[in-house]
Image (cartoon, grey):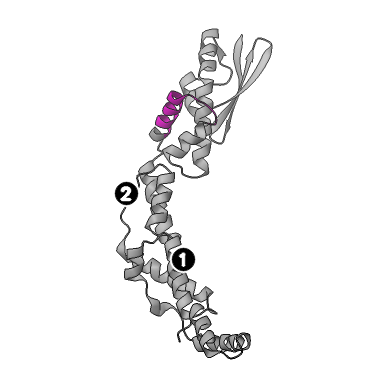
Amino acid sequence: MIKIIKIKKETKRYTITIKADEDTYIFKISEDLLIESRFFSERVLSKEEYKTFLSKIPEDSLLIEGINYLYKRPHSIKELRDHLRDYTSSTSLIDKIVTKLKDKKLLDDEYYKNTILDIYIYDRRDGYNVIYEKLKSLGLDTSFTYPKEALIDNIKTLTIKFNQKTKNEPYKMKVQKCQIYLLRKGYRDPEISRYFNESLINTENEEELKKKETAVLSQKYDGDEIKIKEALIKKGFNI
């Protein structure tokens, strides 16, 4: 006789204890399979029902793995497919799981893309190039419009933050490094040229820095004014 001894509900799945003749087996199954199989405690299964149930375990186990993966945080369809390939080589089986999870509203590339855009534009303040590469790596549609107001505000905010972290450097050097920093954050040359504001770079301690550097260079070059000026220019000071 094959009989369901116990059904225990857990997070995102059920634990089913089945006794088949003298042996006891424990299965972790999804709610989908529980309902589809019409399982309830103390139910007696025919051999055919039990055989059908066992044949559905591989697909159901993959479904549970997909659900667990998506519950940790949102993922794209590409990410899910890549993850499930660690558990099966069957493309058709992965396709079934993707369809089921989309039907459950657990998988939505458009929603995920909009979430990525919100985080990378308004929280991380990244530029177009960084966001484009992120969307591409996730297998999401890479077309999007960067809001102009956010673009201007982000470049301004990042410039101010960069300036605050680089107080003891010459003005020209700070300007160059800030522009490079904006490029690394994903902003494009035309955007930097148009919206980068050099006046946000602090120059109030420029003269003091130049005096200290001049004193050091004066000793190094024995007071040679030409060499001192050349060195100051290379370091980014205005002469």
* Position in image of residue 130 (x %, y %): 42, 55
25 w.r.t. 105: above or below: above
The residue nearer to you, when weighing 102 against 14, is: 102
Seen in the image, is 1 located left or right of residue 161? Answer: right
Q: Which residue is mark 2?
A: 143
Could you say which quadrant of the image residue 22 lies in?
top right
> Does residue 30 appear in this view?
no
Q: Please state the extent of the stretch shown in magenta in the rendering.
A: 86-101
Query: What residue is shown with label 1?
Result: 181
Judge the density around disc 2: few (<14), some (14-19), many (≥20) Cα neighbours within 10 Å: few
- Residue 115 as seen in the image, left or right of residue 50: left
Q: CA distance from mark 2 to mark 1?
A: 24 Å
User: Which residue is found at the position 51% from the left and 28% from the top?
Assistant: 62
Furthest residue in direction right, as rendered: 22
Quadrant that contains the N terminus: top right
Left or right, 234 with reference to 5: left
Q: Residue at x 43, y 24 (%)?
A: 92
Q: Residue at x 54, y 31 (%)?
A: 86
In front: 154, or 195? 195
Residue type pointed to by label 2? Ser
Q: How many marks?
A: 2
The secondary structure that dominates the magenta segment is: helix
Q: Quadrant of the C terminus?
A: bottom left
> Looking at the image, is mark 2 or mark 1 earlier in the sequence?
2
Amino acid residing under circle 1: Tyr
Residue 188: x and y in percent read 36, 61
Instruction: Reply yes or no: does residue 1 show up in magenta.
Output: no
Residue 28: x percent and y percent? 58, 27
Image position of 28 with respect to 200: above or below: above
Q: Is residue 113 above or below residue 218?
A: above
